[in-house]
Amino acid sequence: LILVTSSGLFAGPEGPFVHIGGIVGSWFADGPGCLGMNSWWPLMLKGHRNRCEFVTQGSAMGVAAAFGSPVGGILFALEEASTFWSKSLMFRAFLGTMLAAVLAKLTTNGFESLNASGFIEFPDKHASFVFWELFPISLLGVVCGLLGGLFNNSVKRMTLLRRSLFSLQMPTKASRIGRILEVALVVFFTVVVCFWFPVAYGCRQLPTLPEAHDDIHHRRLLGGALDGPPDLSGGLCSEGQYSAMAYILLQPKEAATKALFSKEMAYGAEMDIATLLLCFFIIYTSTLITFGSAIPAGLFIPNILSGACLGRAWGQTLQSMGLDVHVGIYALMGAAGALAGFSRMTVCLAVIFMEITSNMYLLMPLILVIHISKTVADLFGPGLVDMILELNPDIHLLEDLPDDREIAMQSLTVHDACTPEVMVLRQCEHFQKITRLLFQSSFSAYPVVTDDDRLVGLVLRSRLVAEISELSSNPSQVVPVLELAEDTLPESTDWATPVVDAYRRFKTSGLSHLCVIDEHNRLVGILTRTDFARLCQHGREGDEEVHHLIERKFEAVATGQVHLPYADSHSPQKQSPNDSSHDEAESGSENTPLSPGQW
């Protein structure tokens, strides 16, 4: 990440920081297994729900560290990184994001001072707008939304192309070499374009030459960070000349963004509309081909820079019409609209821009441009994060149920939607039978039942694997499975519970498994994220899944096949290592799961 962000590639640190924060949070929940400390790691930190909360807090702290925005980090986790929330999680996340933001600012300043400003300082603290400007700002939001939808669909096509070209699902040595060569080509393209385009575009003479006592060299070294307007002179140009394109493409991204947010430049330099539009096209295209390659790359900073170029070009177009506008404000609106166009975040973006610019006067136009950009971009598909996750078949997202589908599911119960064929473990099992179960299945957890099938616990696959590894020297030993269960009171629900209510509970509580039981606490099925994800997925697939369940239930009712799930003669099929069904599976026979109408 350090090498990528310092190389000048159009890749930001915020996405990788979120990833790093999630990894560290997961590490706190699981314990440092590489040090052999899992055995005495505090039990209160373990478990699926704690892991989800730690990952959520870590992602919020990553955003806070990247932008210096503690409240924005919390809202990012609330909008993007979590499906459930609680007051205790809010308190811990708020404390963690505050510490992350403070330490990031202290580290940036060498622990000499604590800068109160945000990551990107808006130069004009008292800049404001007039009411009629909301109309051109709205038009800018529409354009940003269209470009955001185009960006996301282009990324989707390139992701599918990379997946087929480099065999990402089954990588080979040749495909890995191809990924490295792709990165080399991206770097070569970025260097050539960002250097030779400014050279070919040429330099301009400064309208006003700097005075002798002006500390121009110091200003250049700091990227125009001294008080006053940014200095565009120097760089590729000789003394007394400047290149706006070279400044935007070759200076650090923060300095270039601050220059775009400024109302005017030092010594009368200007950023003309053609230069800004060309820079926008270069940054937009470079970001598109960089994201998805085999390097850590965030999209916030490149989109802020490209959106600022587009917004400033629109502001200067209004100026050329004789209108008195602050072009820096339009650059800020363009940056916010570009972020909303690809990410579809709303409140989080507004708060992040408030924190990084320290300007509350611009809240109303910020909210307007973010809302319009998101609304327009939603017409072309989901946000980039959701789209990338949907392309991964191993990830199951739990989205909000559409209103029409929720109405259609009112007649369904968890009894109709759950998986009836469940692999279970008894309270004590032999070493060899547990090993055989782990080889035959890949489930992340297994219900623990008594001899009469009453649910008493849920044991994770990772705990079983760890226990088997320790007992490998004594394969004849009996394993106390119930003692390995982290949850001796697993989440369960009655078989007649409406599936819509169970889905809300599953999502808001951050569950990974929901056991379905009868009135005698006997296990009759199980629901996982995979089951619920099939019901809530958008589009035709989700509608067909619900339609199939409804048809199956009506057919069972019409043929008189529906029985109470706790009737002994119609109890669902559960597989245990003690059952003969495992032997049948080894011999190659198929076990057909019972449909809910046959229970």
Image (cartoon, rainbow, N blue to C red):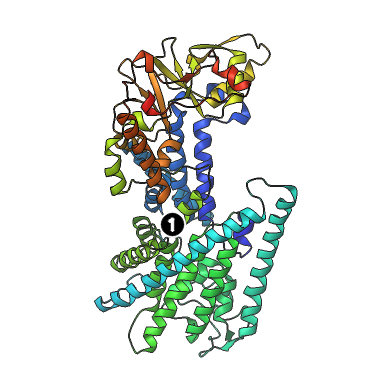
The residue under the point 29% across, 48% down is 404
Q: Is residue 227 visible?
A: no
Residue 202 percent location from the top left of the image: 62, 86
Left or right side of 266 for 197? right
Quadrant into which the N terminus falls = bottom right
- For label 1, the crowd category at 10 Å Cα-Cα, with few meaning under 14, some 14 to 19 and many 20 or more, is many
Q: Which residue is mark 1?
A: 383
Left or right side of 7 for 228? left
Q: Secondary structure at mark 1?
A: loop
Q: Amino acid at mark 1?
A: Gly
Quadrant into which the C terminus falls = top left
The residue under the point 42% across, 73% down is 331
Please identify the quarter of the rendering in which residue 436 is found. top right
Q: Is residue 15 visible?
A: yes
Q: Is residue 587 above or below residue 224?
A: above
Residue 20 percent location from the top left of the image: 54, 46
Residue 224 percent location from the top left of the image: 52, 73
Residue 261 percent location from the top left of the image: 43, 73
The residue under the point 49% across, 32% down is 29
